[in-house]
Image: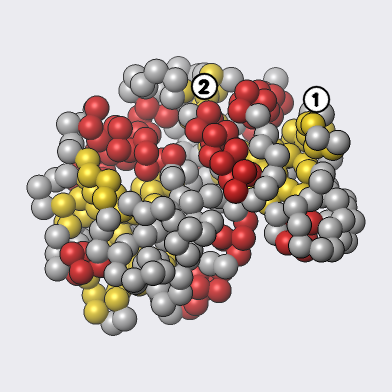
Amino acid sequence: MAKKDIDWGNIGFGYIKTDKRYVSQYKDGEWDAGTLTEDDTVTFSECACVFQYAQTVFEGLKAYTTQDGRIVTFRPDMNAERMMDSAKRLEMPPFPKDRFIDAVRQTVKANEDWVPPYGSGATLYIRPFLFGTNPVIGVKPADEYQFRMFTTPVGPYFKGGAKPITVRISDYDRAAPNGTGDIKAGLNYAMSLYAIVDAHNAGFAENIYLDAATRTKIEETGGANILFIDGDGNLVTPKSNSILPSITRRSLMIVAEKYLGIKVSHREVTLKEVAEGSFKECGLCGTAAVISPVGCINDHGKEIRFASGMEKMGPTLQKLYDTLTGIQMGRIEAPEGWIYEI
């Protein structure tokens, strides 16, 4: 076996078909044994529930080559648990946690030649997803489902370093109280597409959504949780029942406390305190970029600038980024159970 002949340092963040993907079917109340296949196409009735009523959930994680040459994934058990929660919320049969982790192992192993080498900045992105497949015309859950998992090599999210971005306060709502904002459902991302295109057209990198009930509290962006560093160097993360529980954010909170001795506060954050300058650093966190630094928030023309500036990631967020990526790449010893070796 040999690595694919790819210029790993220059691939983008997009889809590249790899050799195998994992597929399991749910029918008559149970999941089948599952299998690996070379077929990357999916064919269903035009009336399949996923097409009519968006009954689909997904996850995202990565496989890495560590400094000592091992192929590993990062906390796949957390992705499995979050996907089970998402499925339950949309009345879908959860794909069992042990089988999810085994599917990760099988799929990455079958595509190990596509795992970028250590030091390239690239990784193997893993996309599990679950959707209703049988015809449904009345509004109700499907009876049959398919779980799939594919991989694609992706380049570094930031080429040439992570430059701080400018984001805006959105006039749109991302999620309602007691809605589906805390699960990873395709429908949540579909509703954000108009807002993100509009933001890009206006010159902004992302939208920051406020709570839909009062429009006074910071929630998250269309695809990432938000991090703040206050004037005392503490990590503050917004808390809400309609925020997706980011695995990266939860991991960074542990890294902050256990590795860096940084005090962590997970609480409601108001737009007012952000505007008043309570925080000196800001970032967005997620699987793709780990941390994207924010230099400026535009609130309807009023610019909220952070002391960390627009040139580079703030010093505290940089320490968090370096420590977490060091754990993922095997340069720093990981907490027990965080690294799953393929």
Question: For this view, does 48 lie left or right of residue 218?
Answer: right
Residue 288 lies, with reference to residue 71, above or below; the image says below
Task: Name the residue beneath numbered marker 2.
Answer: 340
Q: What residue do we see at 14% from left, 45% from top?
A: 233
Task: Name the residue beneath numbered marker 1.
Answer: 33
Name the residue type under label 2: Tyr
Element type at marker 1?
A: loop
Residue 295 lies, with reference to residue 240, above or below; the image says below
> Is residue 234 visible in this depiction of the protein?
yes
Nearer to us in this view, 222 or 287: 222
Nearer to us in this view, 305 or 248: 248
Name the residue type under label 1: Ala
Nearer to us in this view, 18 or 305: 305
Cα separation between marks 1 and 2: 22 Å
The image shows residue 7 at horizontal and vertical percentages of: 58, 41
How busy is the neighbourhood of tag 2: few (under 14 within 10 Å), some, or many (20 plus)?
some
Q: What residue do we see at 37% from left, 22% from top?
A: 334
Question: For this view, does 109 lie left or right of residue 210?
Answer: right
Please give the label number shown on residue 16. Answer: none
Q: For the N terminus, give its image quadrant.
A: top right
Element type at marker 2?
A: strand
Question: For this view, does 25 lie left or right of residue 124?
Answer: right
The image shows residue 273 at horizontal and vertical percentages of: 18, 64
Q: What residue do we see at 37% from left, 27% from top?
A: 327
